[in-house]
Image: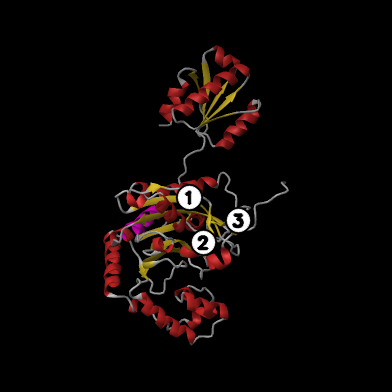
């Protein structure tokens, strides 16, 4: 046993389970790459102020969950708790919005960090794949992103997830609703922290998960009753486009995302097989975020889907992913000459795209064949001095158990044909 363990609330991705995570990331990214989204990668830490401004100073993420620290040079930084603010900062810094092709469509994948109470489905280090469409106000963009996320989940075999949809209004109609909600909240018996949050951003109180708070929120005014005509029309078009694409969703007038920057369209992907941590992803429109962090007006929309939560959802449904074999061919040399020859064969197999591995460490036949079995390889190549003197190797089918001699110079082409 090592002296050290992974920090509390974190996890290590190790084979064979790590293959599931890679497959989930690839499945989520695939429809994005096919829809004009380019890959972006940002640092794992940013200025604290970027998240305080963008995510919102009243959010739990900023006030309680952010890993913030000061460098030796006096810079105040934080490990990124979410991806949108970082991606928008990078796009603005690189002037991508000035290249004349809006929206700027970006996707990303990485690790994020929040100091939360660890439980199944909620970690202090977690992985997400996200997408952002920056610089255009168009219901079709909102619909596109929801449809692409739905497509990604269905390609993995997930079926028991639900899409919750709502509109949070804009700077024209939300202030009226905000005032009405604050009036309602003042009449409730809330603790000081919650009352303070209600003064800064009362919509955050609607997102409070505590039962005693939720019970008091029965009868709270709903934002949909305060939407202006423009927001109503915008939201209706998003709904129509999603419906026309055959994507099912549920209208949820109480849905409020946990970040301050959202406007208009907001949505969440939930899976009822995950217990209390049912959200597997979500997002929405954030038309004012660019200005909040010092950029020009750039209406934008995006989402982030949790990789670890998605893996848990797959397990809850009993979905077994069809993962490619990590090793298709395993080579077992018997003797020094066979080591040299078979190492060359393995190298050539890899060059033509066949996943191949080798028995390292000078193991005997019994130990090497155990390694071949553990590798999951479909075929094993075995060769000793007698085989090589005859110009052949022994090719064993690990499924049927059948074995046959194949010429040394023909083995690569033979395996490539069999595994095509």
Distance of label 3 from label 1 (alpha carbons): 21 Å
Identify which residue, 398 or 318, lies in the foreground: 318
- Secondary structure type for disc 2: helix
Query: Most prominent secondary structure in the magenta stretch?
Result: helix
Q: Pointer 3: what residue?
A: 74
Q: Pointer 1: what residue?
A: 42
Q: Which residues are magenta?
A: 143-155
Closer to the eye: label 2 or 1:
2
Q: In the figure, 275 relative to 386: above or below?
A: below
Closer to the eye: label 3 or 1:
3
The residue shown at (31%, 58%) is 136
Q: Pointer 2: what residue?
A: 49
Pointer 3 or 2: first along the chain: 2
Pointer 3 or 1: first along the chain: 1
Identify which residue, 288 or 127, lies in the foreground: 288
The residue shown at (54%, 37%) is 376
Farthest-out residue, bottom:
187
- Secondary structure type for disc 3: loop
Pointer 2 or 1: first along the chain: 1
From the viewer's perspective, tell me whether residue 8 is left or right of residue 389: right
Distance of label 2 from label 1 (alpha carbons): 16 Å
Q: Which mark is residue 288?
A: none
Residue 5 horizontal/vertical position (percent): 68, 51
- Quick one: quadrant of the C terminus? top left
Farthest-out residue, top:
389
Q: In the figure, 165 relative to 154: above or below?
A: below
């Amino acid at each position: 046993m090592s002296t050290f363990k992974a920090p509390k609330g974190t996890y290590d991705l190790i084979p064979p389970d790590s293959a599931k995570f890679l497959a989930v990331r690839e499945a989520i990214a695939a429809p994005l790459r096919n829809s004009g989204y380019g890959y972006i990668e940002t640092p794992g830490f940013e200025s604290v102020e970027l998240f305080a401004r963008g995510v919102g100073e009243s959010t739990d993420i900023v006030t309680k969950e952010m890993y913030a620290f000061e460098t030796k040079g006096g810079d105040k930084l934080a490990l990124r708790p979410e991806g949108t603010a970082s991606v928008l900062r990078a796009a603005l810094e690189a002037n991508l919005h000035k290249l004349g092709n809006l929206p700027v469509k970006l996707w990303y994948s990485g690790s994020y960090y929040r100091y939360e109470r660890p439980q199944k489905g909620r970690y202090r280090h977690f992985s997400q794949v996200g997408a952002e469409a920056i610089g255009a106000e168009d219901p079709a963009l909102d619909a596109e992103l929801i449809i692409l996320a739905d497509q990604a989940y269905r390609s993995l075999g997930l079926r028991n997830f639900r899409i919750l949809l709502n509109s949070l209004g804009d700077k024209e109609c939300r202030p009226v609703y905000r005032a009405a909600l604050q009036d309602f909240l003042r009449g409730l018996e809330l603790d000081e922290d919650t009352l303070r949050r209600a003064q800064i951003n009362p919509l955050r109180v609607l997102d409070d998960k505590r039962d005693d708070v939720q019970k008091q929120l029965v009868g709270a005014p709903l934002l949909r009753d305060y939407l202006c005509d423009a927001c109503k029309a915008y939201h209706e078009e998003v709904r129509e486009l999603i419906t026309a694409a055959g994507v099912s969703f549920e209208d949820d007038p109480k849905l409020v995302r946990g970040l301050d920057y959202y406007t208009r369209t907001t949505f969440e992907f939930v899976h009822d097989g995950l217990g209390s941590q049912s959200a597997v992803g979500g997002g929405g429109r954030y038309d004012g975020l660019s200005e909040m962090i010092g950029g020009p007006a750039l209406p934008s929309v995006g989402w982030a889907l949790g990789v670890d939560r998605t893996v848990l959802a797959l397990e809850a449904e009993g979905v077994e992913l069809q993962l490619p074999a990590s090793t298709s061919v395993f080579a077992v040399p018997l003797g020094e000459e066979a080591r040299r020859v078979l190492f060359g064969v393995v190298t050539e197999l890899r060059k033509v795209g066949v996943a191949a591995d080798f028995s390292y460490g000078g193991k005997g036949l019994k130990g090497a064949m155990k390694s071949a079995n553990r590798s999951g390889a479909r075929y094993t190549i075995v060769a000793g001095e007698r085989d090589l003197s005859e110009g052949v190797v022994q090719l064993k089918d690990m499924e049927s158990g059948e074995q046959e001699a194949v010429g040394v110079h023909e083995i690569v082409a033979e395996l490539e044909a069999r595994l095509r």
